[in-house]
Image (tube, rainbow, N blue to C red):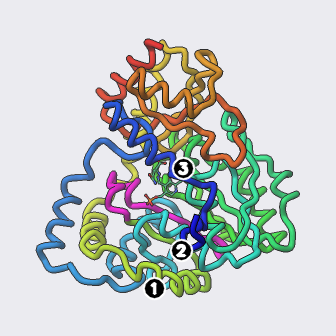
Amino acid sequence: MAAWVESKLSGIGESIFSTMSRMAHECGAINLSQGFPEFQPPQTLIEAVHKALLDGYNQYAPMPGLPLLREAIAGKCAANLGYILHPETEITIVPGATAGIFCAVQALVHAGDEVIIIEPAYDCYAPAIKLAGAVAKSVALDPRTGEIPWDQVRKLINIRTRMIMVNTPHNPTGWVLSEADWAELERIVLASDLLLLSDEVYEYMVFDGQKHRSAASIESLKDRSIRLSSFGKTYHATGWKLGYISAAEPITKRIREVYQFMAFSASTPMQMGLAQFMRAHTDHETSVAALYQSKRDFLAQALKASRFQVLPCQGSYFQLVDYGAISQAPDREFAEQLTREYGIASIPLSPFFRNDPGHTLLRLCFAKENQTLAEAAKRLCEI
Ligand code: PMP
Ligand code: GLN
């Protein structure tokens, strides 16, 4: 291969979300693979964006985002999540959490550094670390219990360790960090003077009466953490690609240094529409948990008659199922077979690990209409 097309991400390949969504389309399968809602964002939100377009909000937004939106975010965090953010200095609007993670890593992780990730890890973490010239070090949580081997995390830490990344609620397993996990994490981060990147894009999807715990709500972690949120998740609009980074002012400064050259700013009419919607509606965010909890329960109930084992799910819009009673095939192979032969597309877990641990687990997205979930479950019950 010519040197000028040598990959900077060799060995990483196509995202499993692209692969499985394409296969779902080709096979005409029900797509429970890539995570996105089947339903629309609230009508009033769509109307607010439409109005912003017509009202002339069509040129560049200020680099860190529209002040009105940043104020609305700070208001929601104070009212719903229990922490205070300064809209001017601690919130930066970005074109989606993926871009936010990439930007934060490029801004704060240096060549030669090490970053600890917890597998199964969302697919954009390792490439962002690699492109910063750094090295990802991983430990694996137990998808059946959500247990994180904190002793192994401690063993990985050395003078080069710069950052640890966590994700709560967790994609793909649905686990939420417990108070004990936060205490361990806090001890580790403080003892070794690390940065914490906390991916909280499913912050409003926490079930069974639990509340989302953010790194921003833990005093000692607030100043050394970078938190990611995604409007795509909370407002059922993944295609809008809009999110935000929150971090203390010194960290935000570093992030904005890079962001101004990475994208400069994010879609103005979308930002304006969201700001107006968030100001006018006080209860959308807090209604999201009940919506998804009912879908989680609907799917779990419908799968009771199947040979799939449904694992616990504390948050996110993903359900793990174990197909071990049906097949011992590798997960990618089984997911492909399920798509082709039974018309159900899912996400295998192995792409979220650097070394396939050999789990017989698949991820199903339940952000779908109940009739879609019912039809999917019917097909799964036939296997
Ligand atoms: N982090 C996690 C854990 C995700 O699941 C996703 C997308 N589903 C993202 C980040 C990226 O979010 P966005 O679509 O806003 O880029
Ligand atoms: N985050 C979504 C998921 O987990 C997919 C986003 C993407 O396709 N990059 O399914």
**Marks 1 and 2, how far apart at CA:** 10 Å
Q: Amino acid at mark 1?
A: Gln
- Where on the picture, by quarter, is residue 231? bottom left
Q: Are marks 2 and 3 in contact (CB under 8 Å)?
A: no
Question: Secondary structure under badge 1?
Answer: helix
Measure the alpha-carbon separation of dots 2 and 3: 28 Å
Place of residue 153 in the rendered image (x, y in percent of width and height, measured from the top left): 81, 55
Q: Which residues are magenta?
A: 222-241
Position of 127 with respect to 374 (left or right) is right
Q: Which image quarter is the N terminus in?
A: bottom right
Residue type highlighted by circle 3: Lys
- Residue located at (65% from left, 49% from top): 177
Type of amino acid under label 2: Cys
Of the residues under marks 2 and 3, which one precedes in the sequence?
Answer: 2
Q: Position of residue 228 (x, y in %)?
A: 52, 65
The response on whether ligand 1 sits within 8 Å of label 1 is no
Q: Is residue 204 visible?
A: yes
Disc number placed over residue 32 in the picture, else none: none
36 sits to left or right of 383: left
Residue pointed to by mark 2: 103
- Residue 222 placement: quadrant: bottom right
The tag earlier along the polypeptide, 1 or 3, is: 3
Magenta span contains residue 373: no
In this picture, is 61 found above or below 375? below
365, above or below 138, in the image: above
Residue linked to disc 3: 211
The circle on residue 260 is 1
